[in-house]
Amino acid sequence: MNDLSSYSLAVLDASDALSCFRDRFHFPEPVNGIEPIYFTGNSLGLMPKKAREYVDQELDDWQRLAVEGHLHARKPWLPYHEFLTEQMAAIVGAKPVETVVMNSLTVNLHLLLVSFYRPTPERHKIVIEKGAFPSDRYAVESQIKFHGLDPSESLIEIAPREGESTLRTEDIIALIEREGPSIATIMFGGVNYYTGQAFEMREITAVGHRVGAAVGFDLAHAAGNISLEMHDWDVDFAAWCCYKYLNAGPGAVAGVFVHERHADCAEIPRFAGWWGHDKATRFQMGPDFHVLRGAEGWQLSNPPILQMAALRASLEIFSAAGMPALVEKSRKLTGYLESLVLEIGDARISVVTPSDARQRGCQLSIRVTGGDRTLHERLTQNGVYADWREPDVIRVAPVPLYNSFADVHRFSQVLRSALT
Ligand SMILES: *Cc1c(COP(=O)(O)O)cnc(C)c1O
C-alpha cells in the first residue's frame, strides 16, 4: 500500500463506502490558504452539520413553548436523554438498560467509583495504568483519600517494562493475579490517550473478576474509535466523554455504562439525585428515594438539552455508518498512515502505538527523538491539525468518519518535508 500513485489513492478513496460521511461535517477554515488535514478528532471531533439544526430546534421550542417544552417540544425534554440511549449503547456494545447519557466524564468517574470502589481493610487497592490521563489519576487518588486511605498503599500503577513504551497484557494479568486479594477495583483506560494503546479489556475484566475485583474502563479515547463489547466482556462499569470521537462539541454531555447484572441492585451505595428516581413517581416529590433500574439510576439532575441536541446529530451519523464499517476503514486508514510514516525512513522517527491492530484505534503516537515544538509548528503551518505532547510525541488521529486516504497521504508528505 505504501507506493500508491495519486491515481490509485483516488481509487482507494472512491471505493471507500464511508467517504460520503465526510460531507456531513464542518471542517475548520483553511490555514494560509491551505485546506486543513484534521487529525485531532481524538481531542475535539468535528461539528456535524446537523448539530446547528438540532440545537436551533430546541432553542425555538424554548422560545415558543417555555416550560411547556418539557412535555410538548417536538422532542420533549422530559424524556430527551432516552432518545439517545439506544444509539449510544450500540457504540459501546451495551444494552439500553446499561447505558445513560449524563454529566461530564470526570464527574461520572467519581459517581461510579462511589458505587464500585468500596474498600475494606483487606481489599482496598485500585489498579490503573501508569501514564493514565491526569484527571483519572486525580479521581482515583482523591477517592482513596476520601475513604481515609493512603494512595501510596492503595494505588497501583502498572508501568511498561524498562525500555518499552506500552504495556504487555501478560504483565497486566500477572500483576492482577499477584495482588488479587488486595484489589478492590481495576480502572483502566480503554485506549491510552498518550500512547494510543488499546488495552485488552476482555482479558483484563476476566482476570479482575477471577480475583474478586470490580472492573471498569474510561472509554474517552475508545468510544466511537474501536470495537467495544461492554456487555459481553462483562465489564462492571465504564464512562466516556462525547467531545472526542463522538463529535458532540466542546464540553459535551458524557456517557455511562453499568452492567445489567447491577441493574436491580438498589442497595449499591450511590450518590442520589431526583433524576435517578423512579419516573412514575418522581413528580410526587416524596422524601424517599426509589431508584430507577439500570444505568439511569445513577442520574442526578435533569439533563442539558442543548448539549444533548448536538450529541443527537452525531449519534445519527454513527448509527448510519455503523461501528463495524468504521472500524474496518479505520484499520486500513491507520495501517496506511503507519506504512507511509515508516517509509520516510528517518532514524529519529518511531511509532509508539502498538502495530497490532487489536491493540490500537485510529491514533498513532509518533515519537520524534530530539524533536521539539518547531516541528509541530511546521506541520501546523502546512494545514495539519495534530497535537504535540511533551517531551517528543506527535499524536495524529485519522478518523474514519471524515478523514480520507488522501488526507493521510498528504500528511506524510508534509511530515517528510518538515523533517528536512
Ligand atoms: C479527555 C479525557 C478526560 C477529560 O475529562 P473531562 O472530565 O471530560 O474534562 C479524562 N480522562 C481521559 C482518559 C480522557 O481521555
Image (tube, rainbow, N blue to C red):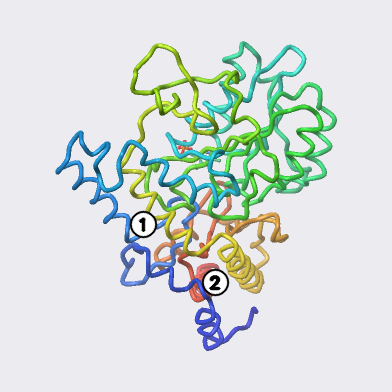
Height in image: 136 above or below 286?
A: below
Q: Is residue 65 left or right of residue 310?
A: left
Residue 402 spot, x, y in % from top left: 45, 66
Q: Give yes or no for contact between labels 2 and 1 (Cβ–Cβ under 8 Å).
A: no
Residue 92 spot, x, y in % from top left: 57, 48
Disc 1 marks a residue whose amino acid type is Met
Look at the numbered disc 1 and say if its residue's Cβ is closer than 8 Å to ligand 1. Answer: no
- Residue at 81 percent across and 27 percent down: it is 180
Height in image: 223 above or below 146?
A: below
Q: Is residue 191 left or right of residue 32?
A: right
Q: Nearer the viewer, residue 313 or 87?
A: 87
- Residue at 46 percent across and 64 percent down: it is 379
Q: Residue furthest left?
A: 64
Q: Which residue is mark 1?
A: 47
Q: Quadrant of the C terminus?
A: bottom right
Height in image: 361 above or below 303?
A: below
Q: Nearer the viewer, residue 183 or 415?
A: 183
Q: Which class describes the residues within 10 Å of circle 1: few (<14), some (14-19), or many (20+)?
A: many
Asked which secondary structure carries label 2, the reply is helix
Residue 328 spot, x, y in % from top left: 61, 66
Residue 63 spot, x, y in % from top left: 15, 42
Q: Which mark is residue 347?
A: none
Q: Which class describes the residues within 10 Å of circle 2: few (<14), some (14-19), or many (20+)?
A: many
Asked which secondary structure carries label 1, the reply is strand
Q: Which residue is mark 2?
A: 412
Q: CA distance from mark 2 to mark 1?
A: 25 Å
Height in image: 352 above or below 10?
A: above
Look at the numbered disc 2 and say if its residue's Cβ is closer than 8 Å to ligand 1. Answer: no
Which quadrant would residue 68 be assigned to in this image? top left
Disc 2 marks a residue whose amino acid type is Ser
